[in-house]
Image (spheres, grey):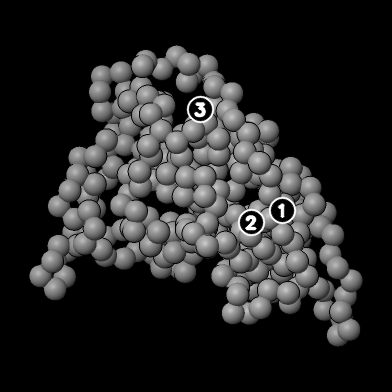
Amino acid sequence: MALRPTTGQMLPEDPVAERRNDLPNNEIGQTVINKFRPDLMESLDVVRSGSSIAIGGFGSSGRPDALLNALCDLDRRDLHVIVNNVGNDFTGVGRLVMEGRVRRVTASFPILQEFYDLYFAGKIELELVPQGTLAERLRAGGSGIGAFFTPSGAGTMLADGTFPLSYGDDGVASFVPEKEARQINGRPHVLETGITADFGFAKAQKADPKGNLRFHLSARNFNPVAAMSGRTTFAEVEQLVETGEIEPDDVHLAGVFVDHVVMTSAPIPATPSPRMEACPR
């Protein structure tokens, strides 16, 4: 799969590259970049079951619903989602969870009660990460930084190897690994690794054909860092404008971090899976 070359063009082996609809060549003979994909389902088909996906949004604010709906329509499963939270209803990431499509959640505060029903029933894994640390891990992964030290979480069960990653029939089945600790300026710190996901999903207010993005107010939240951390990134947008219509100072995320641009759509509620219905309440 092609991974964001420096030229902005996709490699030949990318199945989407052969189907893209490029603009005509410009006057100096170079291909004009066009990352807009009119067929969302066709372009998202490259995302396979078992993938890791960094997802922007804060609850339903700035959440890439069109992309999440399409994952369900494509029947993708066994996913590892990296997201701030799973929301408080059965749309978006909550839909993925309720339909039994998620294997692991890396998040800062999943508040959906049905998620915890799955977690304690041993049907989903949880890697709990402090919110600021999660944002920095995503940014670090997208910036090529392998790891960093932070005081957040030091001296807690999130760092000492005692936080349950998963449950089984007899209780805790596995734990989040213990983190390396170090004293820095007289204060305890722990080592956190950067996150590089197979795919990044983001939602923006505007995009141009080169993939430059502009977000709307607080809907920016985790979207830039989720997009940065994906080896291949999809951005769903409310408006597609011509190249140059977004002023350089108004570009919140450069197109170098975006591979595919699709149009947004409304959220679709979940159809609970049999595994969810079987969970004890």
Q: Position of residue 156 (x, y in %)?
A: 17, 48
Quarter the N terminus occupies:
bottom right
Q: CA distance from mark 2 to mark 3?
A: 24 Å
Q: Is residue 227 left or right of residue 186?
A: right
Question: What amino acid is labelled 1 in the image?
Answer: Val
Q: Which residue is mark 1?
A: 262
Q: Is residue 186 something that shows in the picture? A: yes
Q: CA distance from mark 3 to mark 1?
A: 25 Å
Is mark 3 in CB contact (under 8 Å) with mark 1?
no
Relative depth, front residue between 76 and 216: 216
For disc 3, the neighbor class at 10 Å (few under 14, some 14 to 19, many from 20) is: many
Question: What amino acid is labelled 3 in the image?
Answer: Met
Q: Which residue is mark 2?
A: 235
Relative depth, front residue between 115 and 150: 115
Chain-order first, disc 3 or disc 1: 3
Q: Is residue 198 something that shows in the picture? A: no
Chain-order first, disc 2 or disc 3: 3
Q: Going 15% across and 52% down the picture, which residue do you hit?
A: 155
Is mark 2 in CB contact (under 8 Å) with mark 3?
no
Q: CA distance from mark 2 to mark 1?
A: 6 Å
Question: What amino acid is labelled 2 in the image?
Answer: Ala
Query: Mark 1 falls on what kind of element?
Result: strand
